[in-house]
Image: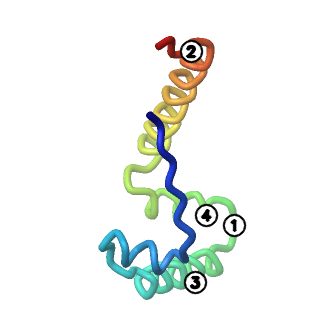
Amino acid sequence: MKMNIEIDCSPEEARALLGLPDVTKANEAYVEKVTNLMNGAGGIDQLQELGKQIAPMGQMGLQLFQQLIETGAKAAMSGMGSKDKK
């Protein structure tokens, strides 16, 4: 048996339903800080340095994320050809 449930609610209502904290103020502060840093960057070299500081693990983190996405895409593509027989 397959059952689908559709819930129509705002992001705030979904957070409350799932018991997640409201991080709106923290997100706004983070976006403001990053925007100010980027506005102060005068060229590509400064933006690259800023990116290294902001990224949690720098280039290695981005490569790990890319590998994760590629692995997931390959798994999804390999599963598309097979159908469940019951």
Residue 1 vs 49, above or below: the answer is above
Q: Position of residue 69 (x, y in %)?
A: 52, 35
Residue tagged 4: 47
Q: Marks 4 and 1: CB-CB under 8 Å?
A: yes
In percent of the image, x 58 and y 57: which residue is there? 48
Q: Nearer the viewer, mark 3 or mark 2?
A: 2
Front position in the image: 34 or 27: 27
Sequence-first disc among 4 and 3:
3
Label 4 and label 2: CA atoms lie apart by 47 Å
Q: Nearer the viewer, mark 4 or mark 3?
A: 3
The color scheme shown is rainbow
Q: Amino acid at mark 2?
A: Lys
Sequence-first disc among 1 and 3:
3
**25 relative to 8 in the view: left or right:** left
In percent of the image, x 43 and y 37: which residue is there? 64
Label 4 and label 3: CA atoms lie apart by 12 Å
Sequence-first disc among 4 and 2:
4
Residue tagged 1: 43
Label 4 and label 1: CA atoms lie apart by 6 Å
Which quadrant does the N terminus fall into?
top left
Q: Position of residue 71 (x, y in %)?
A: 49, 26
Q: Position of residue 65 (x, y in %)?
A: 47, 40
